Image (cartoon, grey):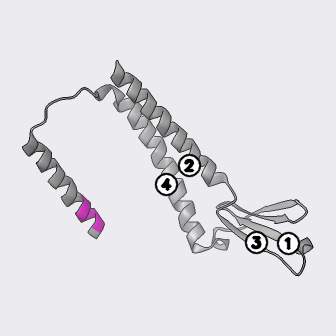
Amino acid sequence: MASQGLQILGILLSFIGWLGTIITCALPMWRVTAFVGANIVTAQVIWEGLWMSCVVQSTGQMQCKVYDSMLALSQDLQAARAMVIISVIVGVFGILMAIVGGKCTNSTPRICNPKDAIAVSVRFLRLSLRLATN
């Protein structure tokens, strides 16, 4: 029964992390630039996000504009946009796999053969190195 509680906790935490990824994707504060002129009256802060750019005046007024084209973004924001979208999609599949595969896992301790553990570790390292070099 403790196994089921741990599975529910894991799925809940992964869902909270997935929601955090979506919120981070929507925020306009990926790059913040401040401009202060000769006096404090002309101060403004520019927020550049993945989907829009906002300008906040010193009076507190904010104006946001959605990017006209994907080419209007700098390369680092284009890469961040792609990686965040991929992470949201992979997060959905991860949560679905955790829910579906929950019945196939348990957290009861079992005795493992040390030779098997070493063999699995070596295979994992070889696969990791192969992926890293490609």
Image x and y of residue 120, in percent: 16, 48
Q: Which residue is mark 1?
A: 43
Farthest residue to the bottom: give it.
Answer: 38
Marks 4 and 1: CB-CB under 8 Å? Answer: no
Question: How far is disc 3 from disc 1 in space, using C-alphas?
Answer: 8 Å
Image quarter (top left, top right, bottom left or bottom right) of the N terminus: top left
Instruction: Specify the amino acid type for callout 1.
Output: Ala
Q: Earlier in the sequence, mark 3 or mark 4?
A: 3
Instruction: Specify the amino acid type for callout 3.
Output: Ala
Q: Which residue is mark 4?
A: 86
Q: Is residue 1 above or below residue 26?
A: above
Image x and y of residue 43, in percent: 85, 72
Instruction: Specify the amino acid type for callout 4.
Output: Ile
User: Foreground: 62 or 92?
Assistant: 62
- Residue at the (84%, 60%) spot, across then down: 62
Marker count (numbered)? 4
Of badges 2 and 3, nearer the viewer stands 3
User: Foreground: 78 or 47?
Assistant: 47
Label 3: few (<14), some or many (≥20) within 10 Å?
Answer: few
Q: Which residue is mark 2?
A: 21
Q: Which residue is mark 3?
A: 34
Q: Is residue 131 magenta?
A: yes
Marks 3 and 1: CB-CB under 8 Å? Answer: yes
Q: Which residues are magenta?
A: 128-132
